[in-house]
Amino acid sequence: MFALWLTRLRAAVSKRELEVLRLIGQGKNNQEIAEMLHLSDGTVRNYVTRILSQLDLRDRVQAVLWAQQHLIN
């Protein structure tokens, strides 16, 4: 069951988006994520927007909770 869920997650969210999501789950803000991944703030914002849409989450708080429940940090 978990393997099927993980396969679906990987199909919906790119590897880079998973990296961003893990960092969100660790409480990092966009600027910190941008510096860690060598991206612009705008690129991180775009990733966050896509993540929220793809996982049907309303806001960053839900993304943090989702990441903490579903991803290994």
Image (spheres, helix red, strand yellow):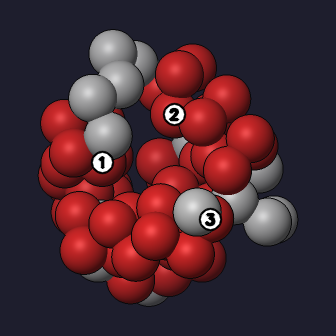
Structural distance between the alpha carbons of marks 3 and 2: 19 Å
Q: Give residue 19's position: percent from left, percent from top.
A: 52, 73
How many numbered marks have been drawn onto this rendered protein structure?
3
Badge 3 element: helix
Q: Quadrant of the C terminus?
A: bottom right
Helix, strand or loop at mark 2: helix
> Which comes before the other along the chain, label 3 or label 2?
3
Above or below residue 51? Residue 73 is below
Closer-to-camera residue (71/5): 5
Residue 35, given in percent of the width and then of the height, sits at: 54, 72
Which residue matches tag 1? 51
Q: Nearer the viewer, residue 65 or 32?
A: 65
Answer above or below: position of 15 versus 44: below
Mark 3 vs mark 2, foreground winner is 3
Is 5 on the left or on the right of 40, as rendered? right
Q: Which residue is mark 2?
A: 63
